Amino acid sequence: MSKTDETIPEKQAETVQTDEKFFERVDTLIAITNGYIKKEVHPTFASNSFMFAASRFNAWMVAAGSKDAEEFANEKEKILEYFTDQYKLMLNDNLDDYIRNFDKYMNPENKTPKEK
C-alpha cells in the first residue's frame, strides 16, 4: 500500500476533522498494518484487525464524551450513521484514487502492468 496523498477530496473536506498531523498518523497506522502483512499474515486478516481497532477506538471515544450510559445508548443510531457514512465516503474516495492510479500504485516502476 502506498503512502497517502496529502489531500482530502472535497466530499470529505466538510466532514472530516483534520490537523497538521493527520496524514502522518494515517501513514504510521498503515505502516504498522503493512508490517503484519510482511510477517505472512494475509491482508484480509490485517484489514479485519485494522477495522476492528478503529471501531473499538471510536466506541471508546464516543463513550468518553458521553454524560452517562443512557445518553450514550440514546445516541447509538446517530453514532452508527455518522461513522458508517464517513467510512463509506473515505472508502469511495480511496477506491476512486486507486482506480485512477492503478498502474502507479499496483505496478511499481520496475514492473510492467500485467497482461490482460
Image (cartoon, helix red, strand yellow):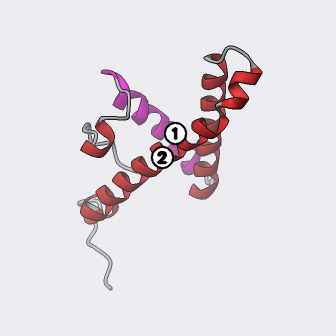
Magenta stretch: residue 29 in it?
yes
Chain part drawn in magenta = 19-39
| Residue located beneath label 2 in the image | 85
Numbered badge on residue 102:
none
The spot of residue 23 in percent (x, y) is 35, 31
Query: Looking at the figure, which quarter contains the C terminus?
Result: bottom left
Q: Quadrant of residue 16?
A: top left
- In the image, what residue occupies the spot 30% across and 21% down? 20
Relative vertical location of residue 28 with respect to residue 36 in this rendering, above or below? above
Q: Secondary structure at mark 2?
A: helix
Q: Secondary structure at mark 1?
A: helix
Q: Residues within 10 Å of mark 2 (few under 14, many from 20)?
A: few
Residue 108 seen in render: yes
Magenta segment, prevailing SS (helix, strand or loop): helix
Name the kind of residue labelled 2 in the image.
Asp
Please give left or right for residue 66 compared with residue 85 in the image: right
Q: CA distance from mark 2 to mark 1?
A: 5 Å
Please give left or right for residue 98 compared with residue 109 in the image: right
Camera-side residue: 2 or 9?
9
Residue 54 seen in render: no
The spot of residue 114 in percent (x, y) is 32, 77
Camera-side residue: 74 or 86?
74
Name the kind of residue labelled 1 in the image.
Tyr
Cβ–Cβ under 8 Å for marks 2 and 1: yes
Please give left or right for residue 80 compared with residue 72 in the image: left
- In the image, what residue occupies the spot 31% across and 83% down? 115
| Residue located beneath label 1 in the image | 82
Q: Residue furthest bottom?
A: 116
Relative vertical location of residue 67 with respect to residue 80 in this rendering, above or below? above
- In the image, what residue occupies the spot 64% across and 45% down? 49
Camera-side residue: 39 or 81?
81
